[in-house]
Amino acid sequence: KLYADTVGTDQRGQLQDASRPDLIWFEDFETRATLRSAVITHALWDNMEEARTGLSQNGASLYTCNYISERGNVHRLVQKKSIKHIVLITPIESGGTPAWNAYTRDEIALIKREADDFEGEYLCKPSAGMDIMFDRTRLELQKPKSPVKELSGFKMFGEFDPSHRYGSGHDVAGGVGLDSSTSAIIDFSTMPYEVVGTFASNSIKPEVFGDEIERELSYFGTPICAPENNKYDQVVLRLKQLGVKLYQRQGKLTKINFTPPTEYGWNTNVATKPKMMFDLVKAVDDGHLLLNDENLINEAISYSRDDLMDKEIDPRLSTRHFDLLCAAAIAFQMKDFADVKKEVRRPVIRQ
């Protein structure tokens, strides 16, 4: 028995007569219209998952759709790792030769000239589209390193050198299992610069993250620190209590001779976010920064101009997170403020 419906219909507990279905085929379930809404994208995923988990014991699900973006559910399915999960990608051409008998070389050449997004629509390569931020060929040269130490989730990719300049950036989250609170520490005394420490947790609470940051910085001589100060002030307040050297920005003198108070930490907004991300992109593309952390490299691979333009949305609706990349971008902004840790010399008391 064959039954047809739309992917937007509630699928929970679907039965065919008295039996659960043996096969569900999801056809063309993602378009540019659905991708424009995180709410719709998330709802479609929930419906498909409800249907899949309601299959018979030996049932299977089949998904056929264009791979036009790394922001949606097709990308989520492509990235899914499971023994029983099979991904088959069939571009319209391979190595300049038509892969489908339905098209000739001339017809493909005409499609290529007229298509708005040939790579996404016909090659299933959204990563080759015009909206990617980082140069993929440069990122392929970034080889992940194994940490020299890993201490309670904090990964260290190099040993501390007192003669080196370090700076750190931190993205702060709510600690409710969605987006993550992250840290990135960069060594600015090597060439190329190197990410020497990273941390990511989606469960650590903001009121505890301040102590975690202080712990991480202690392994690198307590360098200048730039925690994001957008939402969770308790992190900055705790770091001030602990005596951490915080990045600070002094407000400019106004026409009425009023100077706003000093702002501690880094404020990510519509003015600072593009600058910090494009600075990071240029450093990586020019070969001036080694990311080292595999998760950080993967976030850079997926990051697009659409992600740059996104406003603050509900993290429950996001299919991808770039918290570690954001921390690295903030840390890179500290290159002009980092200095060598100065030793405190105690006076010699002569008898």
Image: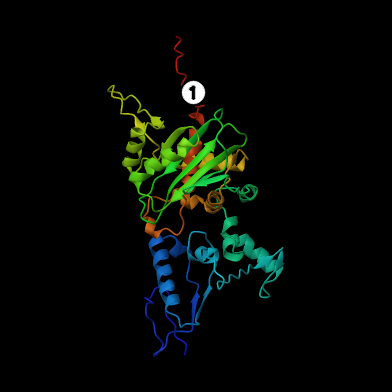
Query: Toward the viewer: 200 or 317?
Result: 200
Quarter assignment of residue 107 = bottom right
- Image coordinates of residue 122 in percent, x first then y, are 60, 65
**Residue located 39% across and 50% down the image:** 311
Depicted 140 relative to depicted 215: above or below: below
Depicted 85 relative to depicted 220: above or below: below
| Amino acid type of the residue that numbered disc 1 sits on in the rendered structure | Glu
Quarter assignment of residue 40 = bottom left
**Residue located 31% across and 41% down the image:** 234
Assign a secondary structure to mark 1: loop
Work out which quarter of the rendered image holds the C terminus and state it.
top left
Q: Is residue 270 visible?
A: no
Query: Toward the viewer: 145 or 313?
Result: 145
**Residue located 40% across and 69% down the image:** 46
Across the whole image, how many numbered discs are drawn on residues? Answer: 1
- Image coordinates of residue 135 in percent, x first then y, are 60, 48
**Residue located 55% across and 71% down the image:** 85
- Which residue carries the number 1 mark? 343
Q: How is the image coloured?
A: rainbow
- Image coordinates of residue 121 in percent, x first then y, are 57, 64
